[in-house]
């Protein structure tokens, strides 16, 4: 039996809503990792979710968050940028590939090193009780470039010590938690 126009529109609308919910979770994850906010990170996963992270971790996602937070808080600045997400919906499951670029600053041999990495997040999302969350994640690394840190702040145009210049932080004191 053929679907009516109303039924097709309803299915299409459900897909739009699902994709939006999935992208919200991906955005929350990027914010959570960059702000070292364990509660936000855990909110992205179902409690029994699996995390496979670059050969450094394979197991329960909540345990991954608990192990990663002390390391993330001890690192320098970090930023995760999300690119295109390809989302295949199959009822209560979605298979999602999201391009990601990361910047992170590490201490090495008494100096700072900036590392730029490009990769993809391969996620299986599940909708449980009407809520989309990650049920399994595999991080795929495509490229990396490490370089000594050379901050010039736009050739001196900006000065981080100037009153009023807002700098990012890895805690609830980050300006993104303010409501103005």
Image (spheres, rainbow, N blue to C red):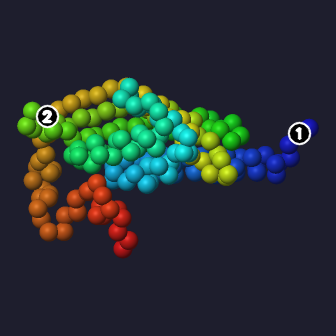
- Is residue 50 found left or right of 80 in the rendered image? right
Q: Which is in the foreground here, disc 2 or disc 1?
A: 2
**Extreme residue in the bottom direction:** 180
Q: Is residue 66 above or below residue 172?
A: above
Residue at position x 36%, y 64% from top?
Answer: 177
For the C terminus, the image quarter is bottom left
Under circle 1, the secondary element is loop
Disc 2 secondary structure class: strand
Image position, residue 120 (x, y; %): 44, 32
User: Disc number at residue 108?
Assistant: 2
Q: x and y percent of residue 131 in the render?
A: 62, 51
Specify the farthest residue to the right.
1
Q: Sequence-wise, which precedes: disc 2 or disc 1?
A: 1
Nearer to me, 76 or 97: 76
Left or right, 167 with respect to 89, comes to left
Is residue 84 among the parts visible in the rendering?
no
Expressed as whole percent of the image width and height from the top left, the position of residue 73 reads 27, 49
Q: Which residue is mark 1?
A: 2
Report the Cα–Cα distance between label 2 and label 1.
64 Å
- Identity of the residue drawn at 46% across and 44% down: 62
């Amino acid at each position: 039996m053929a679907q009516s126009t109303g039924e097709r529109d309803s299915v299409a609308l459900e897909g739009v809503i699902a994709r939006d919910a999935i992208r919200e979770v991906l955005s929350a994850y990027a914010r959570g990792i960059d702000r070292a906010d364990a509660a936000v990170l855990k909110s992205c996963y179902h409690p029994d979710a699996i995390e496979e992270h670059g050969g450094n971790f394979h197991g329960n996602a909540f345990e991954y968050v608990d192990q990663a937070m002390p390391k993330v808080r001890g690192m320098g600045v970090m930023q995760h940028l999300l690119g295109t997400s390809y989302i295949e919906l199959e009822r209560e499951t979605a298979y999602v590939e999201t391009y990601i670029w990361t910047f992170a600053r590490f201490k090495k041999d008494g100096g700072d090193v900036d590392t730029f990495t490009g990769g993809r997040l391969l996620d299986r999302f599940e909708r449980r009780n009407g809520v989309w969350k990650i049920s399994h994640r595999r991080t795929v690394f495509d490229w990396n470039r490490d370089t000594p840190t050379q901050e010039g702040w736009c050739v001196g145009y900006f000065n981080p010590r100037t009153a009023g210049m807002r700098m990012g932080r890895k805690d609830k004191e980050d300006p993104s938690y303010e409501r103005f």
